[in-house]
Amino acid sequence: MLETIKISALEAEKILELSEGHFLDFKSIRISPVKLTKAIAAFANAEGGELYIGIEDDPREWSGFENIEHANAHIQILDSLFPLGTDIEYEFLKSELQKGLVLKVIINKSRDLKSASDGKVYIRRGAQSLPIDDQGRLQSLRRDKGIISFETELVNCPLEVVTNSEEIIDFLLNVIPNAEPEVWLKKQMVIQNGKPTVLSILLFAEEPQAVLPKRTGLKIYKYKTSSEEGTRETLDFQPITIDGNVYNQVFNAVAETVKIVESVRLQTTDGLVQVKYPQEAIHEIITNALIHRDYSIAEDIHVRIFDNRVEVWSPGKLPAHITPENILTERFARNPGLVRLINKFPNPPNKDIGEGLNTAFESMRNLKLKMPEIIQEGNYVKVILKHEPLASPEESILIYLLNNKEIANRHAREVCFIKSENKMKRILQGLVQNGLLESVPGRTRYTAAYQLTGKGTETAKKL
């Protein structure tokens, strides 16, 4: 049984005032099945979105289903393509001042390609659902989804580039001394049909940049500014290029980035202070960029160092169902072979899939700095390390309560990353004594919780 959510007249009006766009669409209950599945497939193949069925567009008005049963045909169409609970969620919205039930469909970014009922693949672009007919664009979308990986593509170069390189010889001497390069590489499926794959070039060629130009470079920039954009005028020196195989690139890029960061001085109210970031965070984010980038895109990785932050730009969108919101909890590797084989190197730079970013977040937290930001911008994934202090526990609690009715000691510890129950108790009591919080009435000592006072609400808004 689908849930029916009762919303206020004000909430209904806010929905009607929303603008259609890349993440939002409105449809009439008279929509044809084909058009409905086009919209759903387009959202699933892009970054996901929300679809309201039962809202007329011109003029914009609420005109929903008479009852739940009248929406059965629409739900059956969606279930046939997208099983309930897989990449899609439904709920009905009911407002006492509006006509009928609106079916709200929440579409998540899918792991695979979704086709509409006409058999075509669509993708969301702005407020449109556009078909993809070109095979090149379909291949690109399959790579974005992680269905296929560029690392398995064959490279037209001599086999000796990977079978007789210093890299493969050093690797085997340290890891599998008795193995023969060509035999071992064939067993690992990185030589096929007498040709090396992209993956073998990335790890075992002496100069991958010569074989795969523009796809394997990493550049480091230093800007003498805290502005949003770096310019030629604020560039401290010519960009540094880090070449070599992926394994060496990780360690060389991290070492160079750390050296530059440690030379930065930031002007504060206490005067010039040295900028410090945890080396673990820099290491994990650069490793993540090199291992998980989309190597089909002819573009470098860019590490941009500003006075107040470090930005790492990695070519390619987040793969499959991964989003900036779920990246720390979900697991998916765009280049699974690269993840697997680089882990065989001595002192491998990578942890299990996803664990590296968790380490980066934890190390920033331990240094009392704000959490990294992960942003998908155009055809890049951008990770930002900011040299900004983490909010105090008191500030975090007040800000949390702006969007939540109450907070208990246990939840407050989770919000503030504090393990001690007694320490959190003292913080909460201090907020009560300062008139910012009050106990939720009618609670026992076991269900005790706190809520904002009027003064606390005003203070939280200012924060």
Image (cartoon, grey):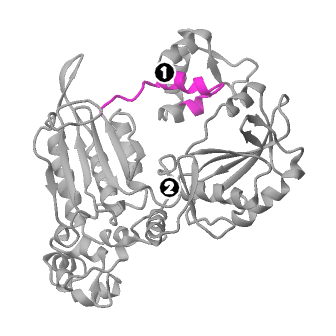
Q: Nearer the viewer, residue 202 or 128?
A: 128
Q: Distance between the residues labelled 2 and 1?
A: 32 Å
- Left-right relation of 448 to 352: right
Q: Do the residues labelled 2 and 1 touch (CB within 8 Å)?
A: no
Question: x and y percent of residue 84 in the render?
Answer: 73, 59
Q: Which of marks 2 and 1 is in front?
A: 2
Q: In which quarter of the image is residue 217?
A: bottom left
Can I make out residue 179 in this image? no
Q: Residue 50 — which label?
A: none
Q: Quadrant of residue 241?
A: bottom left
Q: Is residue 399 magenta-colored?
A: yes
Q: Is residue 58 magenta-colored?
A: no
The range drawn in magenta is 387-412
Question: x and y percent of residue 117 in the render?
Answer: 69, 67
**What residue is shown with label 2?**
322
Q: Which residue is drawn at 61% across and 10% down?
A: 454
- Left-right relation of 421 to 97: left
Q: Residue at x 10, y 46 (%)?
A: 238
**What residue is shown with label 1?**
394
Question: x and y percent of residue 121 in the render?
Answer: 58, 65
